[in-house]
Image (cartoon, grey):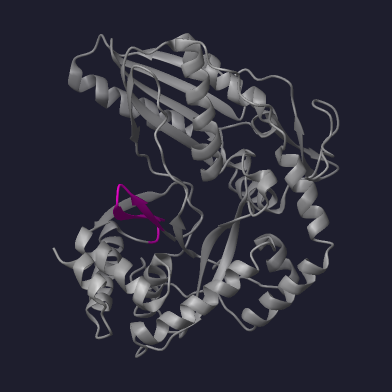
């Protein structure tokens, strides 16, 4: 176990992690809140409002990260934990409106709520909203700032503890949650010590070789011709892959000894190559710092951006490219502990004009998205348009045996038609890859028969 060296609550300040520093500076430069991360659910049934609010505040009270404030001390951002676990919860009753107007009004209220700024210095960094649509239908939103939370924190810790806390208050008889043993400041301390270790030196050497002479990916030919400008809101486009295609991809992965993500990234790399005038394709993927068991139940920002560089000519086939992508990803995973912000500084990577070092991100969501189980309530997730700093941010999800993808994009650079064109091309590329000649085992044929 690591030693707890974090400052006492409400007294001294501590440093930010490198991921936090990068996000803090981006938001500071934008002058507005970019990284509010809401989870919004429809609750059907009888809601115990007092139990729900108390359960939320219990989660915030348990985790230092959710009670953190970010201030500037001697010109540098610092963070400190406050004792106050109060979470404001707005309660709005729309049941008096006609049914059609209730939902329209609720959508407007949720959009306005998402646009409300979060004061990082004064807090709170957690807030809730409960909209009553009918006696047994509510919309519940819990918003956390991304500086103190990530997808794993949400699905594996916050929502799990919320359901436990709510259940205990409604039904009684459940033992209280175990004490939290590791907090985010412990990770910041560990990261600082890791950056002084021989492992850091080895990983810098890997990335120096892997990214020698790299340049940002040029603008895709599908992009708008207007000059790039900073943007503070994103748009989204979902696509679902047919089950027969998903089955074929899994069979192909077994034959080629690669993961599903390796297949998907290879296909999208080929799609990108058709829309840029270079053979050197640089994208990013999201990794994590949770390789140590101490941090499995720690709430905080553990995301790291990992560069993926692939050299591909226009005539490179899918099967020829796949081993390159596999080897690149394996090397990336073995060297994932170097913070991206530190990597950029160590290697002296620079923007090309207005283009950031990485402007396209391709990730695979491995965190299980299990809805909170609240007694007496049917809980469903309501989607929203999340923010991404990338022009194109493609995420793949597997759920209920199916495969879906979400493209978050900058609407100032790409039209919805352009994004749909990319996703349609990805579908065709994947179908073509699974139809390509290659050895087929009997069990693969059995799985892909529809």
89 shown above or below 238 = above
Q: Is residue 353 visible?
A: yes
Q: Which residue lies furthest to the left in this view?
A: 450
- Percent of width and height locating residue 178: 65, 26
Residue displayed at 25% across by 70% down: 443
Q: Is residue 445 left or right of residue 205?
A: left
Q: In this view, does 61 lie to the left or right of 406?
A: right
Q: In which quarter of the image is the N terminus?
A: top right
Q: Which of 139 and 437 is in front in this view?
A: 437
Q: Can residue 267 be seen in this view?
A: no
- Percent of width and height locating residue 427: 25, 67
What stretch of residues is rendered in magenta? 395-413
Which SS type dominates the magenta stretch?
A: strand
Picture quadrant where residue 296 is located: top right
407 shown above or below 91 = below
Residue displayed at 53% across by 20% down: 165
């Amino acid at each position: 176990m690591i030693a707890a060296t974090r400052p006492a609550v409400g007294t001294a300040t501590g440093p930010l992690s490198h991921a936090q520093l990068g996000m803090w500076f981006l938001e500071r430069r934008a002058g507005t809140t970019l990284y509010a991360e809401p989870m919004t659910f429809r609750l059907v049934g009888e809601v115990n409002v007092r139990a729900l609010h108390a359960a939320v505040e219990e989660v915030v009270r348990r985790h230092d990260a959710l009670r953190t404030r970010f201030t500037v001390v001697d010109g540098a951002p610092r963070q400190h934990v406050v004792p106050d676990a109060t979470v404001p919860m707005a309660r709005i009753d729309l049941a008096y409106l006609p049914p059609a107007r209730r939902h329209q009004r609720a959508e407007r209220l949720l959009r306005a709520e998402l646009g409300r700024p979060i004061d990082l210095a004064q807090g709170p960094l957690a807030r809730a909203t409960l909209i009553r649509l009918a006696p047994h239908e509510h919309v519940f939103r819990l918003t956390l700032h991304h500086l103190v939370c990530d997808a794993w924190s949400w699905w594996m810790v916050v929502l799990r503890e919320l359901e436990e806390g709510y259940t205990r208050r409604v039904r009684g008889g459940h033992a209280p949650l175990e004490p939290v043993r590791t907090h985010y400041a412990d990770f910041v301390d560990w990261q600082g010590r890791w950056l002084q270790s021989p492992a850091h030196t080895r990983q810098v050497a890997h990335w120096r070789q892997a990214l020698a002479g790299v340049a940002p990916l040029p603008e895709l030919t599908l992009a708008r011709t207007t000059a790039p400008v900073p943007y503070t809101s994103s748009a989204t486009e979902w696509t679902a892959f047919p089950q027969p295609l998903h089955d074929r991809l899994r069979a192909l992965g077994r034959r080629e000894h690669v993961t599903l993500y390796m297949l998907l990234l290879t296909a999208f790399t080929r799609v990108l190559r058709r829309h840029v005038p270079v053979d050197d394709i640089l994208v990013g993927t999201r990794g994590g710092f949770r390789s140590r068991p101490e941090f499995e139940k720690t709430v905080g920002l553990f995301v790291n951006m990992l560069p993926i560089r692939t050299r591909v000519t226009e005539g490179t086939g899918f099967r020829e490219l796949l081993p390159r992508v596999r080897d690149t990803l394996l090397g990336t995973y073995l060297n994932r502990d170097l913070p991206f912000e530190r990597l950029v500084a160590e290697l002296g990577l620079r923007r090309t004009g207005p283009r950031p070092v990485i402007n396209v991100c391709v990730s695979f969501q491995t965190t299980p998205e299990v809805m909170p189980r609240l007694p007496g309530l049917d809980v469903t997730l309501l989607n929203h348009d999340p923010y991404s700093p990338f022009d194109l941010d493609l995420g793949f999800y597997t759920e209920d045996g199916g495969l879906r993808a979400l493209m978050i994009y900058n609407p100032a650079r790409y039209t919805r038609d352009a994004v749909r064109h990319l996703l349609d091309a990805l579908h065709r590329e994947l179908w073509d890859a699974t139809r390509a000649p290659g050895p087929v085992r009997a069990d693969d044929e059995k799985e892909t028969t529809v």
